[in-house]
Image (cartoon, rainbow, N blue to C red):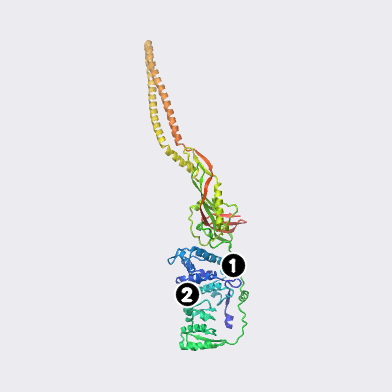
Amino acid sequence: MESFRKNAKISIYTPGSLKGRPVSILSCLKPPDAQEDLWSAASSVANSLFPLAGMSGEKLQSEARLLTELFVHAWKNRIEVLPEDLPRMFLDPPFDAIGGVDVELLVPKKRRQEIAITLSTVFNSPNFKRWINGTPLDFDHLLEEANASIFYLAHLDSNERMMFIALLLRTLHSWMLRKGGSDKLKLLLVFDEVYGYLPPYPRDPPSKAPLLSLIKQGRSFGISVFLSTQNPFDIDYRALGNARLWVIGRLQTANDRRRALEGIVEAGISIGERKELNREISSLKPREFIVYNARNDVMRKMHTRQSFSSLRGPLSLDQIAEISGFQPITGKISGDQSLLDIPPSLPERVESCYLPAVYDSAILRGFNVVGNISLYYEPFLLLEVKARLEKPANGEIKFLRLMPASSMQRDLVFSEKMEPGIRSEQLKDCPLGEKPSLGFKFRPINRALRTRAGIKRVLDGLRNNVAEINVRVYKCEETGECSFPGEDLISFKERQQMKLMERQKKEIEELNRKLMKISIALSKEVGELRELERRLEELKTSIFVGNLIKLMKGSVKQTFRGVGGSYKKIKEIERRISLKKQRIAQIELEKANLEELIRRARAPPTILELTLRPKEVHVSSVMLVWVPVAEARALVGNRMVLVKANCFNGVVSTFQ
């Protein structure tokens, strides 16, 4: 022993405490290497977490089954499970049934919410933060640091001890399977006082299954298990039956002696020898032990030397730190304590939905981030209001408004858009889901909104807010119609133009027919006018030439005699030309009137703008929308700013 003490490198670990050498259990939440060991590993981890939360795993069979399936589902899909993810996964499982049984029947939502709140409380407590800092619970790493590792658990309560021992044994079992078989001793597990961790049927604490597996399979893999107890009656018979080396001291009760004898008989001793052994055990004196080796069936009595011990009791954590020479971890544990792991409950009439997280913390990669990046869901109330407008606009109008749910000011704020980069109209068409994205926590909801009175105040305030809105409405003079609520001017004009054209279609067709007839008549009259003007011109030319010839022949009398008849013909043609021009002017006027009528029929409608107030206002729906946000402090130039990014649409905003 002195040689071992001098040559061995001993490490003393203090799980659950930062004063000594803490141990991180996060590695235990990773999937085992052997797929066939997946379910048993998940079951062990799940059953280990319930005692830590102060709940008895034996009374939570359905809940433990659900938590086990959550680990199995995550590990099969290569999803990293973190403690802060478990409450939300438990509340909203990524599957609907387990083994053909609906999740809601197995564990109702109300019960899931209770468990999720309990787990969230435990995982966010300062004590649990001390379980995720320190040396990882990885045997490759532990054996590299020392060839003797002591896990000091005296400072833990019973639930914490059960959790850690179960995780330690499960981790050791997975490490054993990964290393493969061996006929040489690779590791000795010494368990001082196994009482309560390996009880007989029907009790089944989380530590029992992995410890039994190590006892049964360990020798084939070079793992030896050394157990000590003062109460063998409380040890499962399967463990006793697999023991190969027995060291039995004074047993005070007959039950303990009987259970020890039953185990030795299972190991190979005869019934006759059992009676003799019973007498030997009953007559043992202080510092006397019976040693039985089942491998070579050798039994002997052993006396220890007389020695003195002060029996000072367990060491304190400060003494452990001093002995091990390890510097205790100091300082505060980082993390935003105001964020929640699971969404808070709301009154029944409020539906909850989530925007999917398209981006993660990488969205802030372009900023000089100082400190940690917080990923969380920001809550907003999306409210739909229906109302009717005053005359002359009769019709229903809808309003969509947003209100921040994490804070509730004295003067309620309703808006169509809010930071970080969300608009009420866009949310109406967004792919809203029933489950949040993993890795995001939740901003708390204002306490007032978790009550019916608080919701009623919001609804009353929204109704009053909408009733004071001036709604712009357009009216068409020609049709007497008003625009629909929310319809823009261009759309209303186009709609009224189409309606006017439909209404005046026959009138325009009739006007076009008349215009065509008048155009034909006008063309005919103009043609006849041109003919008369031609004839008049020819007549004048003919008279002029004839008279000129007569004058040249010296027949003056004949010349004057023919002038009177020709003049009458000219006057007649000129009269007819004058009538034609009057007729043409009249037809052109009629044509111009028809063209004006057609132009007016095709002219754009005359639009008037009205301002009206809503009436009969009522809130038609209330929905809580969770918006994924990435938030961090960052240096921009020489200034420190707050950066918030909408992880759904990628909009980034900065605040002083």
Label 2 amino acid? Leu
Return the mark for residue 44. Answer: none
Q: Position of residue 582 (x, y in %)?
A: 42, 24
Q: How many marks can you see?
A: 2
Nearer the N terminus, badge 1 or badge 2? 1
Q: Is residue 648 above or below residue 47?
A: above
Quadrant holding the N terminus? bottom right
Q: Is residue 444 above or below residue 519?
A: below
Q: Position of residue 157 (x, y in %)?
A: 57, 73
Q: Position of residue 494 (x, y in %)?
A: 46, 41
Return the mark for residue 126. Answer: 1
**Label 2 near label 1: C-beta < 8 Å?**
no
**Callout 2 environment at 10 Å: few (<14), some (14 to 19), or many (20+)?**
some
Q: Mark 1, mark 2: which one is toward the viewer?
A: 1
Q: Position of residue 615 (x, y in %)?
A: 52, 46
In front of the other: 159 or 585: 159
**Callout 1 environment at 10 Å: few (<14), some (14 to 19), or many (20+)?**
few
The quarter of the picture where residue 331 lies is bottom right
Label 1 amino acid? Pro
Q: Is residue 553 visible?
A: yes
In front of the other: 371 or 305: 305
Secondary structure type for disc 2: helix
Q: Is residue 280 above or below residue 210?
A: below
In front of the other: 636 or 582: 582
Secondary structure type for disc 1: helix
Q: Is residue 183 visible?
A: no
Tell me the distance, in whole angstroms, between the alpha carbons under discs 1 and 2.
Answer: 34 Å
Q: Is residue 185 above or below residue 112?
A: below
Quadrant holding the C terminus? bottom right
Question: Pointer 2: what residue?
Answer: 177
